Image (tube, rainbow, N blue to C red):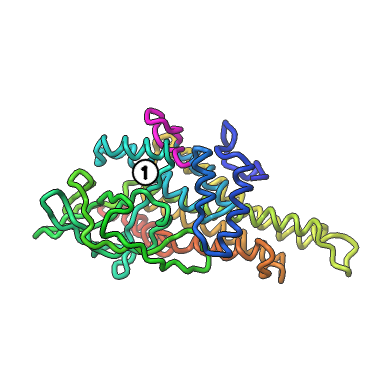
């Protein structure tokens, strides 16, 4: 990033060097045009050690926390948000595995070390065609059936971000027992019965490879069943995981907003219509609009830094609060890009200019869970419940 003023306060240099971010940006523009998976950008992140930023030091990783993760995702988001979303999933999942007692120690060590030595990617497969997101309730349709050696999974997952590059997939499923249990099953890419269906053809993040995953009797060892619990008692995310999600996912789109900011500032400084004696940047109305854009990013920076500090201090807010923060951060990024688009006029819609891509990409901030309506409902329910029993 070229503007350190808009970065989360930090004691050290950015986790990824600027040359790597510039290279990712070049690949990102091409991958967006071709809707091609960002293999080259991910290789750059492997070489930079970024895919193991949150792996514990004991396993060879950087041992980074939420501050380092947010900064890295924001940096990459300014170059290629599709790559940044894959990175966000990787960093959040590795951090969750490292702190979760539900994961067997052997698996925790294996996944961490492979992230360090090979940049092995992992992500969760949770959304389904009928269920939608499990965050809104309901049992997954993916079934885990008992076998002599463990489990066999059958089901259909959607929007599995990074699927063409994943080494491991954490599949949410329910058992076929009389009293179903719900939990995650670790599946290795390439296991017989897995099928990648290229269904991702969206307006934005065209390179994210968020395709469908079809599972047909996929064999899973007994030791790869994680956190199975009765359906009524199963909890998908703990408050810490919700807080990480509330920061890392919007960081992707804050990166997009920062890239849009850089482009529009350069445009305004150099654009001099024939009817004006000076560049657009000299006009008071333009300065006011740029100030409104800056206000969105200032609010985003301050809000993000506050939640980061709380997490680092061990004061993790409830999911109802972090979900509201996620919605606010997403809206700040969207609004910042909208202001840049309004300032650029026709130039913003020209595919020759990167602002057109930034506008498409930032729209995807709306669809990540919790979506704005769900976040507001959860926050409202929590507020109304305060003192209700008194």
- Report the residue at 30% width, 49% height from top: 188
Nearest the eye: 180 or 24: 24
Q: Which residue is mark 1?
A: 240
61 with respect to 360 (left or right): left
Check the image and report above or below for 24 versus 95.
Answer: below
169 left or right of 76?
A: left
Q: Main secondary structure of the magenta part?
A: loop
Magenta span of residues: 51-64
Q: Quadrant of residue 13?
A: top right
Q: Residue at x 65, y 62 (%)?
A: 355
Viewer-side residue, 103 vs 195? 195
Q: Is residue 55 magenta?
A: yes
- Give the image quarter of residue 261: bottom right
Q: Residue furthest right?
A: 277
Q: Is residue 11 magenta?
A: no
Question: Is 310 drawn above or below residue 58 in the view shown?
Answer: below
Q: Position of residue 372 (x, y in %)?
A: 44, 62
Q: Quadrant of the N terminus?
A: top right
Query: Where is residue 378 drawn, in percent x and y?
Result: 36, 58
Eyeballing the image, is 59 above or below 344?
A: above
For this view, does 146 lie left or right of residue 96? left
């Amino acid at each position: 990033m070229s503007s350190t003023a808009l970065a989360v306060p930090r004691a050290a240099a950015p986790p990824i060097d600027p040359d790597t971010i510039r290279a990712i940006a070049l690949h990102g523009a091409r991958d967006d045009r071709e809707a091609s998976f960002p293999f080259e950008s991910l290789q750059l992140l492997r070489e930079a050690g970024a895919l193991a930023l949150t792996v514990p030091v004991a396993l060879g990783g950087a041992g980074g926390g939420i501050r380092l993760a947010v900064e890295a995702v924001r940096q990459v988001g300014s170059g290629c948000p599709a790559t940044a979303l894959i990175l966000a999933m990787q960093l959040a999942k590795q951090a969750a595995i490292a702190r979760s007692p539900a994961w067997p120690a052997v698996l925790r060590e294996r996944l961490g070390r492979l992230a360090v030595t090979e940049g092995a990617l992992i992500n969760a497969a949770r959304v389904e065609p009928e269920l939608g997101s499990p965050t809104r309730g309901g049992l997954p349709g993916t079934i885990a059936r008992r076998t002599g050696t463990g489990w066999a999974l059958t089901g259909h997952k959607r929007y599995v971000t990074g699927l063409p590059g994943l080494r491991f997939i954490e599949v949410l499923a329910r058992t076929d027992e009389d009293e179903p249990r719900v939990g995650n099953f670790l599946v290795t890419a390439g296991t017989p019965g897995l099928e990648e269906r290229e269904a991702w053809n969206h307006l934005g993040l065209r390179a994210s490879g968020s395709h469908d995953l079809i599972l047909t009797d996929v064999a899973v060892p007994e030791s790869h069943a994680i956190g199975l619990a009765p359906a009524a008692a199963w909890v998908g995310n703990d408050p810490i995981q919700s807080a990480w999600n509330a920061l890392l996912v919007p960081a992707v789109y804050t990166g997009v907003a920062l890239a849009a900011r850089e482009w529009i500032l350069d445009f305004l400084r150099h654009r001099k219509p024939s009817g004006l004696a000076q560049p657009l940047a000299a006009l008071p109305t333009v300065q006011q609009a740029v100030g409104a854009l800056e206000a969105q990013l200032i609010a985003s920076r301050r809000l993000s830094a506050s939640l980061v500090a709380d997490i680092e201090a061990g004061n993790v807010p409830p999911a109802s609060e972090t979900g509201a923060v996620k919605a606010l951060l997403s809206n700040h990024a969207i609004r910042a890009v909208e202001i840049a688009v309004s300032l650029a006029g026709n130039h913003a819609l020209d595919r020759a200019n990167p602002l057109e891509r930034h506008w498409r990409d930032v729209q995807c901030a709306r669809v990540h869970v919790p979506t704005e309506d769900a976040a507001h409902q959860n926050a409202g329910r929590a507020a109304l419940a305060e003192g209700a029993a008194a």
